[in-house]
Amino acid sequence: MGTNFGEPGFGDMLGEMPAFFKIFGGLVIVLVVGGFLYVIGKGLTTWTSNNAAELMQRPCRVVDKRTEVWGGSGDSSANTSYYITFEFEDHTRIELQVRANQYGLIAVGDTGELMYQGTRFKEFNRALSV
């Protein structure tokens, strides 16, 4: 039940591995970890910036809607992101990601008040037609 000092282990295998494989393996690990850190950092930056932004409420008109479908290969399910483009009275535009239930309730041509904070959609109150 003691340790087997005479048998080769993982450390011995690494010692015998060519330098190219060590460098390549290390590079892959650095790229994967770096990619994860970049995505996490970018998400935190966007979240912080949205929280620091002023809550805006402006009259606007809905000028476009679009969806983006991603994933869905093999056994994985597809995901859909929903976007609406709003145009303000000064003809500037902003495209915001919205939830599916909001996407279905807002139509191109609708006018009303948009409430948003940075790049975060909050609410759209449609103006009543007379």
Image: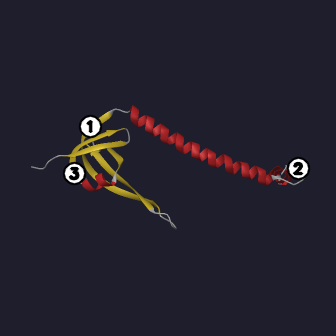
Q: Secondary structure at mark 3?
A: loop
- Crowdedness of circle 2 by 10 Å Cα count: few (<14), some, many (20+)? few
**The quarter of the displayed image where residue 65 is located:** bottom left
- The kind of residue on which mark 3 rests is Asp
Hey, which residue is sitting farthest right in the picture? 6
Give the residue pinned by disc 2. Answer: 5
Q: Which mark is residue 3?
A: none
Q: Residue furthest left?
A: 130
**Disc 2, SS:** loop
Return the residue nearer the eye: 65 or 27.
Answer: 27
Mark 3 packing: few (<14 Cα in 10 Å), some, or many (20+)?
Answer: some
Residue drawn at 29 percent across, 47 percent down: 86
- Can residue 66 be seen by looking at this rendering? yes
Asked whether the viewer can see residue 107, the reply is: no
Disc 3 to disc 1: CB gap under 8 Å: no
Residue 94 screen position, x and y as percent: 34, 45
The image quarter containing residue 64 is bottom left
Q: Is residue 50 left or right of residue 127?
A: right
Q: Is residue 22 left or right of residue 43?
A: right
- Give the percent coordinates (x, y) of residue 1: 83, 51
Q: Which residue corresponds to mark 3?
A: 110
The residue most toward the front is 1
Mark 2 vs mark 3: give the one in front. Answer: 2
Residue 112 picture location, percent across and down = 21, 45
**Residue at mark 2 to residue at mark 3: CA–CA distance:** 76 Å
Residue drawn at point x = 28 percent, y = 46 percent = 87
What type is the residue that disc 1 sits on?
Gln
- Label 1 or label 2, whichever lies nearer to me, is 2
